[in-house]
Each structure stands twice: as C-alpha cells, then as structure tokens.
Image: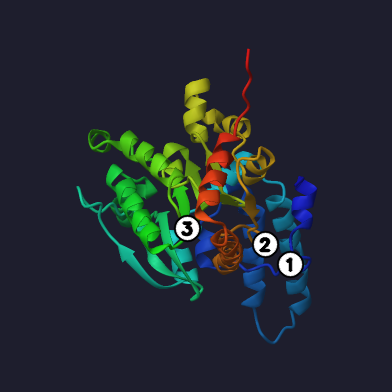
Amino acid sequence: MTKKEQVKSRPKKEKVKHADKALLEICLPFERPVIELEKKMNELSASNESIDLSGEIKSVEKKLEKALKDIFDNLSPWQRVQVARHPLRPYTLDYVNALIEDFVEFHGDRRFSDDRAIVAGFGKLRGKEKVCVIGHQKGRDIKENLLRSFGSAHPEGYRKAIRIMRLAEKAGIPVITLIDTPGAYPGIGAEERGQSEAIAYNLREMADLAVPIISVVIGEGGSGGALGIGVADRVYVLENAYYSVISPEGCAAILWKDQSRAPDAATALKLTAQDLLDLGLIDEMIHEPLGGAHRDPETTAENLGDALEKVVAQLKIIPKKQLLEQRYQKFRAMGVFSKK
C-alpha cells in the first residue's frame, strides 16, 4: 500500500477528537501547530456566550483537521517513533479494559518473582471468544514506570509469559500478545538470571504452540524484548507504532557514534508499519484515528478489536498441524538468501 493509498484508506469523514488538558500540556515538537489551534478553539468556546462565535469555531475546526492530516499523513520514520513513545498512548491494560471482559490476571514464573512489566491473563474478547492476553505494560508516572521497568521485561517476565501460553494451549484458547517495549531489561541481575536464554526459549516454544497466536505491536517493538512474545501466526502493527531490531538511538550510537543521528537511523532501519508491510515482515497495519492513538484511544481500541475478532475467527478453523506448518513457513520465508 502506497502512502497515497494509505491516506485514501481513512474514513471519508473522520471526526477529529478535540484535545483534553493533558494533551495540550504534553506536546511533540511537530504537533505544535495543532496544539495552537486547539488552544484557540478552547478560548473561543469559553468566551462570552452572548456572542455567536460558531462561525469562527467551525473555521478553526477546519484548520485543525487540515493541520492534523498534513502532519500525521506525512510523518517521518523518526516522528512515528516519537508518536509510538507518546506518554498518553494507550498501553496493554488500556486495551484489556476496553476489549477484554472478565479478565483475570495471572502472576509469577514459579521460579523467581512476578515481573510487572509483563501482564498475562485470560478473558473474553468483547465478551464472546475466550482468549489469553499477554503484553508489555509501561507506567503513567515515574513510580509506576519503576514498578514496571518502563515496559522492559526481566527473564521471569518471559518465563511467566510462556507459562501462561502453555495453560492456554492446554485449554485450546487463542493467544493474543500486545508488544510495547524498548527492549528487554538490560540490567546485570537480568543477565545473571538468564535473560537471553529466557527469550530464546520463548522463541522455540511459541513456534511449537498448538493454538493460534496473534501479535500486535501497539507502541514500541524493540529488539529481542519484543520478539520474546512476538512469534505468531499473524503479526500486526498499529499505524504509528514501530518494530525494529534495535532502537534508532542505539543504531546511531553503533554506526555513527552519535545518538543525535537517530532520525537517520530510523529511516535506514525501515521500522514503520508501512515499511514492514512492504517488506513482507508483518501481515497488516491497523489504522489509527487522525492525530494518533493518544488523541483517541477509544477509536483505536475499536479498530484493534475489529482486527482481533476477524483474525481469531480465521485462525480457529485451521487444523493444528496445518497451523504449525504455516507458522514455520511464515518465518522461514523472511529475509533474502543467496547460494554461491
């Protein structure tokens, strides 16, 4: 899908959701023109009610919609990375609350402790289909981010994830994983407890899991930390999320010894949903509302829910043996090989 086709795929009349106070305070650099228009519209709306300003408000609303389209339909890869990291972007538990009824969270890896960077449990997708949901969870403030390690899982988190997946397999329940991490936790303790082995074990076990697996990158999809719960029959990426072998900053530091070249690295890494779709590394890009998921979490959750309902119904009817073979062939087909 080209950029033009991507723009055409938007609903013809998509309502622009007005920014609340939090959005006005947290502004990405390229969002400033939009925020200025939002503030102007708020001032007009709050002015003397005896004066009819409906015409002026409609004029500002049109300018706002145009500004959002001009900006968000033409984001650079680095700008999409910034949107993926927006502190008001919906996280795993936000989608769980919106889409999963009767959700029961499970804790612990039965070896060391409960890693709060990974959320895992069972519930009903929109109150209908039983599903297992596993995902990275970030925090909304410093205290919660420290509790959840900024969404960077420890070995016990990945061990918890595969433990819950095996429970889902026993019950014949599809697995949904929501990926949102800058990478696995890089601390000494995590290495001592077998970080790389835990991720590698998950890759092997997920490849052989005899139930449908759907992975969705909802924000950041960084390195092995993301792939540790990302081996799936279908891999989706939200429009403004990214999925990469390394962060742009890490790539820039290695290649050019200069983290300020992260925008160049983001372009070179081909990490956007559209790039990944063109390369055949993902199955679908899930549309976000105009202005990004952080402006309209409810519509984003609806779009995600629609995609999940559709793919779960498709995968459920595939025989187990065929499902595993298709999953194997899916990942074997990635990359370009040459024989000399």
Residue at 64% of width from left, 51% of height from top?
284
SS under mark 1: helix
Q: Is residue 322 left or right of residue 38?
A: left
Q: Is residue 126 left or right of residue 40?
A: left
Mark 1 in CB contact with mark 2 (< 8 angstroms): yes
Measured from the top left, where is residue 181 in percent x and y?
43, 46
> Spatial distance from mark 1 to mark 2, Cα to Cα?
7 Å
Residue at 37% of width from left, 36% of height from top?
200
Task: Name which residue type carries label 1.
Answer: Val
Task: Name which residue type carries label 3.
Answer: Ile
Q: Quadrant of residue 195?
A: top left
Q: Residues within 10 Å of mark 2 (few under 14, many from 20)?
A: some
> Spatial distance from mark 3 to mark 2, Cα to Cα?
39 Å
Residue at 58% of width from left, 41% of height from top?
330
SS under mark 2: helix
Q: Earlier in the sequence, mark 1 or mark 2?
A: 2
Q: Residues within 10 Å of mark 3 (few under 14, many from 20)?
A: many
Task: Name which residue type carries label 2.
Answer: Leu
Q: Earlier in the sequence, mark 1 or mark 3?
A: 1
> Spatial distance from mark 1 to mark 3, Cα to Cα?
41 Å
SS under mark 3: strand
Camera-nearest label, 3 or 2: 3
Residue 60 marker: 1
Residue 37 marker: 2
Residue at 63% of width from left, 71% of height from top?
43
